[in-house]
Structures are given as structure tokens and as C-alpha cells.
Amino acid sequence: MKIIAVALLAALSCAAQGPFAQKNSEYYKKSLAPYVVSPQQIVDKMLEAASLKPGETVYDLGCGDGRVLITAAQRYRAKAVGVELSDSLATKTEDTVNRLNLQNDIKVIHGDLMAVNLTPADVVTIYLETSSNGLLRPNLEKYLKPGSRVISYEFPVPGWKAKHVEKISAYNRTHQIYVYVMPPAKVE
């Protein structure tokens, strides 16, 4: 029995060092948060808090299964762009978008959210931990135009003062949605 267990551990160890593990290790180096589904009522409240208007463009950074994108396109008639690092989640979201015939309104970028130009965004939604929000902050400040809104579920953006914080009760606890508005450009 011991020999079989040792052989099995050795085989798993070799498999973990193969190309699949290297690919996953690159994924985890770039990942700023684990995939956790945002409940639909939270998504609804986030987009409501953003004051999303028809024709505006919302970017969902770490779009997961695409529910923010789909809700923005269907309910608000907004354009939506999702950025997702995971191959399987990006593919699943693209399949759902195609099945719902929303490909003219929704684009999924399979890639690193830190490498995306956010200039077209009127609204950016995020569900990342506070430290990840801190890493993302310089990109938000670089790309977003004055008046753009950043909506962060559960975690604040370090160094920013929220315009307001929405509270919503769901699943036996209170959730927070931080609403930030990009300030006017500084005149020199």
C-alpha cells in the first residue's frame, strides 16, 4: 500500500509541474481575486447605484459569468465590456452573450484587467479585494474621464472617498456598494 501511495504522490507531483501547472501558475500570478458569483439582486443594486443610462458603456473588470454585462445591456440598454482572465469563464460568458443575441451590445475581452484601456468607460464595476482595488487605482485614474463612476462591491478603493455607500441586506448580512465619481480634471 505504501508503495502505491508514494507512486501516486510522485505522479501527482510530476503532473503539477507540467505545462498545465505552468499555465495555471501564470493565471494565478495575474489574478487579482478569486471568482465569486455576485448575486443578481446585488448586480441590480450596483447598476442602479451607478445611475447607468442608455447608451453609456460599462466595463466589468473580472466579469466572471457576465451577469453585470447582460443586465446592463438588457435592462439599461447600455454597451458592456467584460474583462476576464479565466479561459473557461470568458468562453462561458461569450457563449451566453451569443445565445442571448447580445453580441452587438456586449464584448468580452479575454485578458488581464490591468492591461485594458478603460478610456471608453462611463461606469466601471469591480468586485475585488481592497488591496487589488489599490493596485487597480492608478489605471482608473489614468483612463477614466471626469464624471465616470466606479462601483465597487464590498471593498473600498484605498485613498478614495466614496460619493456614497449603498447598503443592501441579502443572505442574512449587510452588503456594501461603494460609489465613486471621477473628479474634474485639474486645471494647471
Image (cartoon, grey):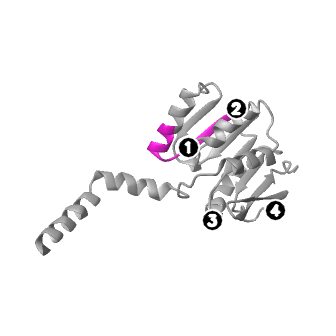
Which mark identifies residue 65? Answer: 1
Residue position marked by numbered label 4 in the rendering: 161
Residue position marked by numbered label 2 in the rendering: 74
How crowded pointer 1 is (Cα within 10 Å; few <14, some 14-19, many 20+) is rated as many
Who comes first in sequence, dot 3 or dot 4?
3
Question: Where does the image place residue 48, in percent across and percent down from the top left?
Answer: 79, 45
Quick check: marks 2 and 4 in contact, CB under 8 Å? no
Nearer the camera: disc 1 or disc 3: 1
Residue position marked by numbered label 3 in the rendering: 131
Question: Where does the image place residue 17, in percent across and percent down from the top left?
Answer: 27, 59
Q: Residue at x 76, y 49 (%)?
A: 45
Residue sitting farthest toward the bottom: 2
Which residues, given as a range, are shown in magenta? 79-92
- Rounded to the nearest angstrom, the CA distance separating label 2 from label 1 is 15 Å
Q: Identity of the amino acid at label 3? A: Ser
Residue 32 lies, with reference to residue 117, above or below; the image says: below
- Rounded to the nearest angstrom, the CA distance separating label 2 from label 3 is 32 Å
Q: Identity of the amino acid at label 4? A: Lys
How crowded pointer 4 is (Cα within 10 Å; few <14, some 14-19, many 20+) is rated as few
